[in-house]
Amino acid sequence: MKSKSNETDHRGASEGATDACTSPQRRKTFKLMACAALVATTGIRPAAAEEDGPKVGDLLVRDGDESKTPLTGADVKLEKKQLIVYPADPTTMKVKDGSRLNRIVVIKLDPQQMDAETAARAADGIIAFSAVCVHQSCDVNGWLPAQKEFLCVCHFSRYSPLRHGEVTAGPAPRPLPMIPVKLEGDRLVIAGDFSAPPGGAPQA
Ligand code: FES
């Protein structure tokens, strides 16, 4: 499993391009050669469009963890920098890393400091969000411990995980989508859908 940090797999570009290569209807108008050329020039794989998104019950596996060890509650330390993970099918342990839109950040914060919307999606203080900035799809991999905010270093958008991903600075046009999690035993699992579609606009 390869890390996909800040690849240029932007939502608009990736979904449009991959749909063109995978949709049965569009296959009628897009020849195989054209799709191959598209993939060659953009690096976008058709598999990305077919990749399942996170589902209820999916486990979480850290980005780049070849051992596919499921994330536990104890792995997420209070107020430490967010971890980047992918969902994984609990039966097959297939890690759903074919699309960057499945990248998720996980962090643990004090539930007493969370607003109600955030607390409702938390498990023992652990909360999860899309890892893909809603501005132009960079990874949201910065952490400002004093402010308790996520930072996207591409254009310095900041998001408050304590306030369900609300934008506190920068050009991001909407909150960072949240995804509910729960603990099953000691393992962290997905407990619902993203609060909004993940991903940002393609770069102009
Ligand atoms: S891509 Fe994150 S602020 Fe622009």
Image (cartoon, rainbow, N blue to C red):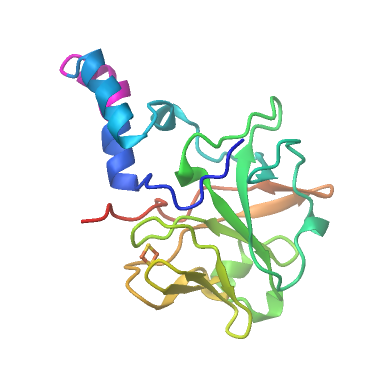
The picture quadrant where one finds residue 154 is bottom left
- Is 85 located above or below residue 56 in the figure? below
Residue at 51% in and 44% down: 102
Query: What percent of the width, then of the height, locates residue 88?
Result: 64, 36
Query: What percent of the width, then of the height, locates residue 130?
Result: 50, 55
Query: What percent of the width, then of the height, locates residue 169?
Result: 40, 79
Q: Is residue 195 left or right of residue 192?
A: left
In the current view of this chain or complex, which residue is farthest to the bottom? 146
89 or 135: nearer the viewer: 135
Q: Determine if the magenta segment contains residue 27.
A: yes
Query: What percent of the width, then of the height, locates residue 34?
Result: 21, 20
What is the magenta segment's predominant secondary structure?
Answer: helix
Look at the image and tell me in which quarter the C terminus lies.
bottom left
183 or 140: nearer the viewer: 140
Look at the image and tell me in which quarter the N terminus lies.
top right
Number of marks:
0
Residue at 50% in and 32% down: 52
The picture quadrant where one finds residue 77 is bottom right
- Is 144 located above or below residue 50 in the figure? below
Residue at 39% in and 55% down: 137
Q: Determine if the magenta segment contains residue 44.
A: no
Residue at 65% in and 43% down: 64
In the current view of this chain or complex, which residue is farthest to the left? 29
- Is 170 located above or below residue 34 in the figure? below
Q: Which stretch did the figure color magenta? A: 19-29
